[in-house]
Amino acid sequence: MLKKSPLAPEITPKLPTIDGVQIATMNSGIRYKGRDDVMLMVFDKGSVMAGVVTKSKTRSAPVEHCVEALKAGGSARALVVNAGNANAFTGKAGDAVVKETVKAATVALGCRQRDVYVSSTGVIGQPIELGAIPACVSKLATQLKPEGWEKAASAIMTTDTFVKVATARAKIGGRQVVLNGIVKGSGMIAPDMATMLGYIATDAKIPQPILQTLLSRAVEKSFNCITVDSDTSTSDTVLLAATGKAGNVVPKTAGDPLLREFRNALLEICHDLAQQVVRDGEGASKFITVQVAGATSAGAAKTIGLAIANSPLVKTAIAGEDANWGRIVMAVGKSGARAERDKLRIWIGGVEITAKGMVVEGYDEAPVAEHMKGKDIDIKVDIGLGRGSATVWTCDLTHGYIDINADYRS
């Protein structure tokens, strides 16, 4: 059992039930012992699903199935997730496991194959026994309850050290709706869509195309703005289900004023879950916020932010509590985005360090060094060339990351 991250939230919120959602978990025996590692989430008839998946060219069989289900219209009745084995790069055998898992769900729930979504996370390249997960699905379908969000979040963990959950409420046309979310992720985290497994559900009534637009936008501002180690998983998936049980006025477009509170609540949950992933970065001891302003575009700002956040030299300096701002200068320069020496300004912990192409006159490193001793590190960069801005979240790189990944399969 891995030691709980020092950056873990002090309080884990209690998630309410979502009308139209039921959950069950159990142990499959695939890899883990003494803990649940399979989760079944079932949605009432009429529910719809939106999703964003990894851009990896070696994505897993479960991801491929989710893509096809979303293309088929995004109707939703079931979600099956297992931890411990990613069912990725497992060839036709992996496809067969997904097919049999979906079949088991359709038989148990009386739904169509296109209504079932599947995710797997864990070791890549190891085949799963064909009947293991389908057998679990059949049993779980008889144990469903409205409660159990925290158990679901625990069941999908791999190297995570704490459960990651979030909840929010909003009003659509005066009718209150609820959103719950869970996520797993600790390593193999880099923004190229969602960078882990995340599941959100709401009782709001929202047409699938609008739901898809809302999720895609929220992911781009949250999950796509985090990085732990610059590695994008073969299994990354974020799904958002809407059961429609709240009975709210149905919005007509993604920009409908009726959805203002809902859009904010969805982004709030995505931000919360994404940052929890970073706070559980493998071996992490510090949470780092990188703000970039003054870039030629928002895209350029994000590119620069990620260059800083992904730099092993920056991350190890922070782990060692070394106020080595020169490594930030290096990262900006290597990003490929436009930058000019004499316009670049850098702050750490609110203290200005550089301006006009050099260190500021009278710079005192003492308050910066003190800031580096804390758990939350703030870096701000102004490129001085435009109005583009972005915020990226990451963590430091410690020897703990090596220890965890060197022993991952043993």
Image (tube, rainbow, N blue to C red):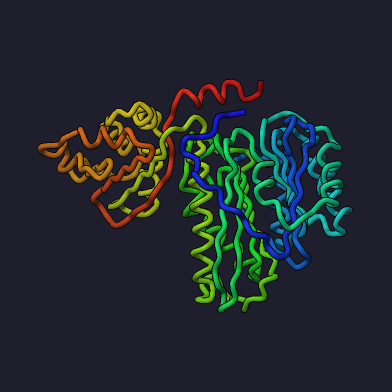
Quadrant including the C terminus: top right
Q: Could you tell me residue 338's position as x and y percent? A: 30, 45
Residue at 41%, 41% in the rendered image: 306
Residue 61 or 40: which is nearer the viewer? Answer: 40
Quadrant of the rendered image containing residue 313: top left
Count of picture labels? 0
Whether residue 313 is situated above or below residue 175 in the rendered picture: above
* 48 lies left or right of 172: right
Residue at 50%, 76% in the rendered image: 257
Whether residue 395 is situated above or below residue 400 in the rendered picture: below
Residue 379 or 292: which is nearer the viewer? Answer: 379
* 8 lies left or right of 238: left
Quadrant including the N terminus: top right
- Can residue 61 be seen here? yes
Residue at 14%, 39% in the rendered image: 360
Q: Could you tell me residue 45's position as x and y percent? A: 78, 66
- Can residue 50 be seen here? no
Q: Could you tell me residue 44's position as x and y percent? A: 77, 64
* 90 lies left or right of 405: right
Whether residue 338 is situated above or below residue 74 in the rendered picture: above
